[in-house]
């Protein structure tokens, strides 16, 4: 198959389903997270779990390395997670491995809007975001699952008309 210049890359799934989809304990935990973070579907939860799984997998593979390569990659991963607001500046790979889904869901725009007191409920926060009433660094963001970086958090405001 010949590809032309500028062809988009192949679409890939951003998530994977659970290995035990009908485990009662897992279902209860999913339901709790969906309720607590105002998620609309399990797809949003799966995306967060997959992103976290990717970070943790990287941390485990970096632990297996030795020398300069390990420190370089460890520093890169931790600085990325620091910019996302998931770990502190002086974090270690153990801190990365101790992250959980709640830590990632806390960085969603929907959750940050609620925690800042802009909205009174998760559902109101989601509605404000989808109706483009929330600005991040002066730009209207309409994605409730947008991952808010550490630098962006203070710049979140309500659109005043």
Image (cartoon, helix red, strand yellow):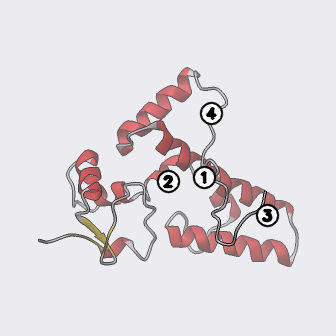
Looking at marks 3 and 2 on the same chain, the residue that comes earlier in the sequence is marked by: 3
Front tag of 2 and 4: 4
In the image, 21 versus 103, the foreground residue is 21
Q: Quick check: 69 left or right of 122?
A: right
Q: Say the numbered circle drawn on residue 52.
A: 1
**Of callouts 3 and 1, the N-terminal one:** 1
Which SS class for mark 2? helix
**56 relative position to 37: left or right:** right
First along the sequence among labels 2 and 4:
4
Residue 149, above or below 41: below
Nearer the N terminus, badge 1 or badge 4?
4
Disc nearest the viewer among 1 and 4: 4
Which quarter of the image is occupied by the N terminus? Answer: bottom right
Element on which disc 1 rests: helix
| Local SS, label 3 | helix
Where, quadrant-wise, is the C terminus in this rendering? bottom left
Of the numbered discs 1 and 2, the one sitting upstream in the chain is: 1
Q: Which residue is mark 4?
A: 18
Rounded to the nearest angstrom, the CA distance separating label 3 from label 1 is: 15 Å
Identity of the residue drawn at 38% across and 45% down: 37
User: 10 Å neighbourhood of mark 4: few (<14), some, or many (≥20)?
Assistant: few
Alpha carbons under labels 2 and 4: distance apart: 19 Å
**Vertical placement of 137 versus 64: above or below?**
below
Name the residue beneath numbered marker 2: 103
Q: Nearer the viewer, residue 6 or 59?
A: 6
Q: Residues within 10 Å of mark 3 (few under 14, many from 20)?
A: some
Left or right: residue 41 versus residue 56 is left
Q: Please tell me which residue is depicted at 46% across the width and 70% down the height of the picture.
A: 149
**Is 116 placed left or right of 146 in the picture?**
left
Q: Which mark is residue 62?
A: 3
Residue at image point 84% right, 78% down: 68
């Amino acid at each position: 198959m010949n590809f032309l210049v500028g062809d988009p890359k192949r679409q890939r799934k951003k998530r994977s389903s659970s290995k035990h989809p009908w485990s009662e304990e897992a279902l209860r935990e999913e339901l709790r997270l969906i309720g607590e973070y105002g998620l609309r579907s399990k797809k949003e939860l799966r995306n967060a779990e997959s992103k976290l799984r990717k970070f943790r997998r990287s941390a485990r593979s970096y632990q297996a390395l030795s020398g300069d390569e390990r420190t370089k990659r460890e520093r890169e991963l931790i600085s990325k997670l620091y910019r996302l607001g998931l770990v502190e500046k002086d974090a270690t790979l153990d801190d990365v491995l101790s992250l959980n889904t709640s830590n990632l869901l806390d960085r969603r725009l929907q959750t940050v809007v609620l925690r800042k007191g802009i909205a009174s409920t998760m559902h109101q926060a989601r509605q404000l975001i989808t109706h483009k009433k929330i600005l991040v660094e002066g730009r209207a963001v309409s994605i409730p699952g947008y991952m808010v970086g550490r630098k962006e958090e203070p710049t979140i405001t309500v659109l005043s008309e």
